[in-house]
Image (spheres, rainbow, N blue to C red):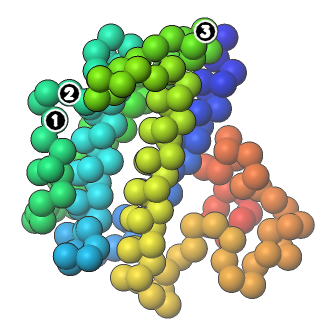
Amino acid sequence: MRTVVSLVEVEFHRYKALGEAAISQLEPEQLVEGSEADNSIATLVWHVSGNLESRFTDFLTSDGEKTWRDRDSEFEPRSASRDEIREKWDRGWGVLVATLSELQDSDLSRTVTIRSVELRVDEALLRSLAHTSYHVGQIVSAAKRFRGGSWTYLSIPPGGSAAYAANPVLEKASQHGQATRDGTK
């Protein structure tokens, strides 16, 4: 049975789609622009991908903080093309998606290890979902700053609450990817 795991899977897909929709609105040079105070979108992509790849490679059988991961390097400023950023993004998400597709609800009470700390699988999944959504939020916020007035809203636009309330298409995670940005199907 995959009731709970499927719900977690759908939520991860929602955040993946939000990140991709934000990234798609930017010019290549905006993806690598950052400062000492703010990570670039490329940096955030490297970190999210590195985290997902490390945590979900051999998820049930090895520590989620792999010895081959160099977390500190994920935060170094980098020059990367849109294709390189997309490739990095897809690699981390691909590992996550493959692992989630194999999990069953009966696995949720099993134990995994992250940085030598034991967690139940459900705890590890929720922790990863929260971590990923936090960084996707940073990506969306940075993209919105870059776009300014030409930003295409990824949820209910300002002044659109009444129209959305009449047709709440984004309330279920499974519907999120099926709706257009203006809230219609």
**Image quadrant where residue 67 sits:** top left
Q: Residue sitting at 45 percent across and 72 percent down?
A: 141
Proximity of marks 1 and 2: CB atoms separated by less than 8 Å:
yes
Q: Residue sitting at 49 percent across and 90 percent down?
A: 149
Amino acid at the residue labelled 1: Arg
Amino acid at the residue labelled 2: Lys
Circle 3 residues within 10 Å: few <14, some 14–19, many ≥20: few
Q: Is residue 179 above or below residue 34?
A: above
**Residue of label 3:** 106
Which residue is at the far right? Answer: 166
Marks 3 and 1, how far apart in space? 29 Å
* Residue 153 visible in the current orientation: yes
Proximity of marks 3 and 1: CB atoms separated by less than 8 Å:
no
**Image quadrant where residue 185 sits:** bottom right
Q: Is mark 2 on a helix, strand or loop?
A: loop
Work out whether residue 98 or residue 133 is closer to the camera in this orientation and state it.
133
Proximity of marks 2 and 3: CB atoms separated by less than 8 Å:
no
Looking at the image, how many numbered discs can be counted on the residues? 3
Work out whether residue 126 or residue 147 is closer to the camera in this orientation and state it.
126
Marks 1 and 2, how far apart in space? 5 Å
Mark 3 or mark 1, which has the lower sequence index?
A: 1
**Residue of label 2:** 66
Q: What element carries label 1?
A: loop
